[in-house]
Amino acid sequence: MKASRLRKTLIRKRRKNESLFKYTMGLLHLWLGLISGIVIVVVCLSGCIYAFKNQFTDLLNKDKVFVKENDGVRKSAEQIQNILLQEGKILTSLVIPVNKDRSFVVSYTKDRSDYSVYFDPYRGTDLGTADVSMNHFFEVILDLHRNLMMGNIGRQINGAAVLMFCILLFSGFILWIPKKMKHLKQSLTIKFTGKFQRINYDLHNTMGFYACLVLFFIAVTGLYITYPWVKNTMIISLGGTSISDLSKESKDETGAFDSIFNDMLDRQKEKSTLKEEKTVSLQEILHLADKILPYKGMITIELPNKDNPRFTVTKINTDNWLGAMLPDEITFDKTGHFKSKELFADKPLNKQFTSLAKPLHTGEILGLKSIVFYFIVCFIGFSLPVTGFIFWFNKFRKVKA
């Protein structure tokens, strides 16, 4: 009896005047939704939580992350380096935020050990290392999001479910399209004064429409990370070279190899010829970097070391119409001579996407505003299997055997 009811709800009859395409989309939407629903709920909910990892970390370390701007003039990078030297600490890198009320992140070596701490640039004091007590929790959430905590098997199940979700979003859009334009308003609004089943249907139908495009983008960028064939397809579609052809290309075209080889030779030469040269001050390096990259942005400066004889300055450029955080990188030798420049805007489209795949997937690309937006969209994604199942189960209960 129940099997008969189940069959009737899973394979419904084609409605009058319903196109074969829309009928097929309806069945596909139902079947794939029931198969992948639980996984999609887990993936979206864990994604919602993990999106705020950095904000949780900042909140947990608010006494170290945020400093009082009125405590004096912000010390220069060189002054901070000298403070560390007096304590027997060798500065290796420095992160300088744009916001004046945030502390610097200082990395240094002491007694052959590496440390990374928050640093108050106004008082010149070490604020200590970050409280990482929440890290284990977020590692579990990330494992749940990526692999369902089941290793490679979970990763494949996850990937298959997300593939189904992409088809669900497409089929859902097809089913959402109103038959007549006069019904468009009804398809775009939620009737909160209706009965529970009507509200549930509107939540599924309307919110699914509003979120489908961004959810599809999040899903595709997730598949890009999971499946090499998706990564390969996207790289080719954006004008890049197939991953399988990279080795062949490196044999056929020696220009890129020569460039890399020459750069390696230059660095080796710098290690030997500039060994006895006086190292330029950090302030001079930052001044030179600002000339080449004349905009405000968070700066990370890595000092020369035994492996890399150059200063490497990375600056986050938000000077674009979206305010996206795009990294630009320049290098100088230890005497302050400009050596290389890699601007995000100059990269081909496929390399731009590759370098931003993670922040595009997580919503970090625009900072807090996009993280909040992604959270709302992912919460809608989490709700879709739930409201969809409720809608189907109500039909199942009403079907006569």
Image (tube, rainbow, N blue to C red):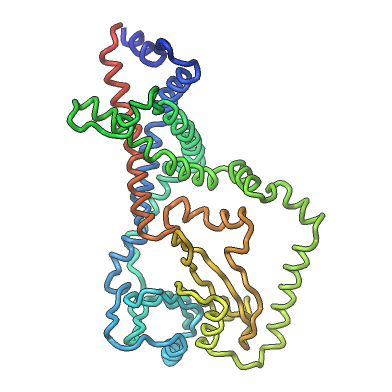
Picture quarter containing residue 42? top left
307 or 68, which lies in front?
Answer: 68
Q: Pick whichever, 150 or 12, lies toward us.
A: 12
Q: How many marks?
A: 0
Image side of residue 124 versus residue 90, left or right:
left
Quadrant in the picture for the C terminus? top left
Query: Viewer-proximal residue, 190 or 119?
Result: 190
Q: Residue furthest front?
A: 182
Residue 196, percent from left and from top? 20, 27
Does residue 79 lie above or below 92 as drawn?
A: below
* 390 in relation to 396, above or below: below
Q: Indicate the position of residue 366 as horizontal and vertical percent values.
A: 42, 59
Residue at the spot x=32%, y=59% of the render? 134
Residue 310 appears left or right of 81:
right
Q: Is residue 372 above or below residue 149?
A: below
Q: Position of residue 250 (x, y in %)?
A: 77, 56
Q: Is residue 134 left or right of residue 299?
A: left
Q: Residue at x 59, y 67 (%)?
A: 343
**Which picture quadrant has residue 212?**
top left
- Where's the N terminus, which quadrant? top left
Tell me the residue at 38%/31% (across/down). 37
Image spot of residue 98 (x, y percent): 40, 74
